[in-house]
Amino acid sequence: MINIKAIYSFFYLLIIPVLSVLYAGLIISATISILAGILRTFGFDQIKMSIWYGIDLPVALSIPLAIIVSAFLFVCSRYIKRLIIFCVTSLRS
């Protein structure tokens, strides 16, 4: 009979790389979001921000929207990091 700990260990080994890539992607996306908001505010016209299809965001609201989006991404990445730590500690024990 297969041991339950072996099954959990197998799934943790599959979950940890996926969560690590997700964590890195969230951090990179949050950083790019802040950078894009700042660049758009200071006149970089190639960056487009829209709320909905065909509804562009005013330039004055670029930084506040970028901060809101990046804060959400940072909060999500914090919980993903907690989940990674949980999986690693469960895998070690």
Image: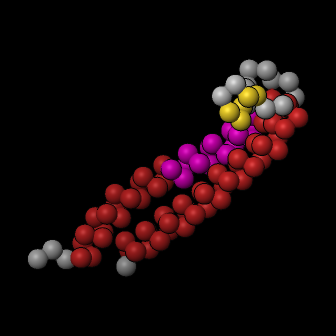
Along the line of sight, the residue nearer the viewer: 39 or 56 = 56
Q: How is the image coloured?
A: secondary structure
* Residue ID at (25%, 69%): 7
| Residue 55: image location, x then y, percent | 73, 28
| Residue 89: image location, x then y, percent | 44, 74
Question: Farthest residue in the top direction?
Answer: 46
- Position of 38 with respect to 78 (left or right) is right
Query: Above or below — where is 42 with respect to 80?
Result: above
Query: Above or below — where is 85 with respect to 70?
Result: below
* Residue ID at (82%, 44%): 64
* Residue ID at (70%, 48%): 70
Query: Above or below — where is 2 with respect to 78?
Result: below
Q: Is residue 28 magenta?
A: yes
The total number of labels drawn is: 0
Along the line of sight, the residue nearer the viewer: 35 or 72 = 72
Question: Farthest residue in the bottom direction?
Answer: 93
Per the rendered image, the range of residues in magenta is 22-36
Res 85 seen here: yes
Query: Above or below — where is 47 with respect to 8?
Result: above
Res 39 seen here: no
Along the line of sight, the residue nearer the viewer: 50 or 10 = 50
Q: Main secondary structure of the magenta part?
A: helix
* Residue ID at (19%, 77%): 3
| Residue 12: image location, x then y, percent | 36, 64
Question: Farthest residue in the left direction?
Answer: 1
Instruction: Give the quadrant of the N terminus.
Output: bottom left
| Residue 17: image location, x then y, percent | 41, 54
Q: Is residue 57 magenta?
A: no
- Position of 75 with respect to 67 (left or right) is left
Instruction: Give the quadrant of the C terminus.
Output: bottom left
